[in-house]
Image (cartoon, helix red, strand yellow):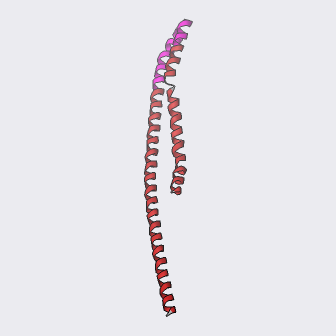
Amino acid sequence: MVRTASNGLSSLSRIHDTADTALSVKSLQNQISELEADRSRVTQTLEARKDTAHQAELAARKREEELSRELASKVSIVLPFQVASTDKGSQTSETESLKTRLRKYSDYDEIKRELDIMKVGVVFMTPIVSKSLAVR
């Protein structure tokens, strides 16, 4: 009779262990599902940011080309007048005028630098995102 009670107790213990294991497996499966959903969301966000950075870069390049064409056309208009002019004062004022106009377009370099920083941020953001997923 002692053996029967002992066998029944060990059977209950095995059933309890199996139930604990099943709960643990279910918990881990839920955690995996949550992590996969997070990874998918982060991937979508990353792709959206890459696309935004690419669009900004294209816009900056287009603006650069427009400004280069505008500057070239203005230089080609001003150069004949500079060559024809023999007055030093007028040449100096024209040069200063051109320098002033060129300074107005100097923000292009700042925009280009910011875009480069954004590209670097997007590229290096991937390891940060992976680490944040690993922490969960």
- Work out whether residue 69 can be spotted: yes
Q: Is residue 96 magenta?
A: no
Q: Where residue 95 sits in the image (x, y, percent)?
A: 54, 14
Which of the pair 21/68 is nearer the observer?
21
Inspect this view and state whether residue 86 appears: no
Q: Measured along the vertical axis of the image, is residue 87 above or below residue 27?
A: above
Say if the magenta span includes residue 79: yes
State the residue at coordinates (51%, 40%): 118
Q: Residue at the spot x=55%, y=51% of the render?
A: 127
Front-most of residues 4 and 59: 4
Instruction: Considering the whole magenta stretch, tell me its main secondary structure.
Output: helix
Instruction: Locate residue 71, reporting x and y percent.
Output: 48, 23
Among all residues in the image, which is located at the extreme bottom?
1
Residue visible at 53% across and 56% down in the picture: 135
Q: Is residue 90 above or below residue 106?
A: above
Is 37 drawn above or below residue 4 in the view shown?
above
Q: What span is colored magenta in the figure?
A: 69-95
Q: How many marks?
A: 0
Position above or below: 78 against 1: above
Considering depth in this image, is 62 or 47 the residue closer to the camera? Answer: 47
The residue located at (53%, 14%) in the rendering is 96
Can you tell which quarter of the image residue 92 is in? top right
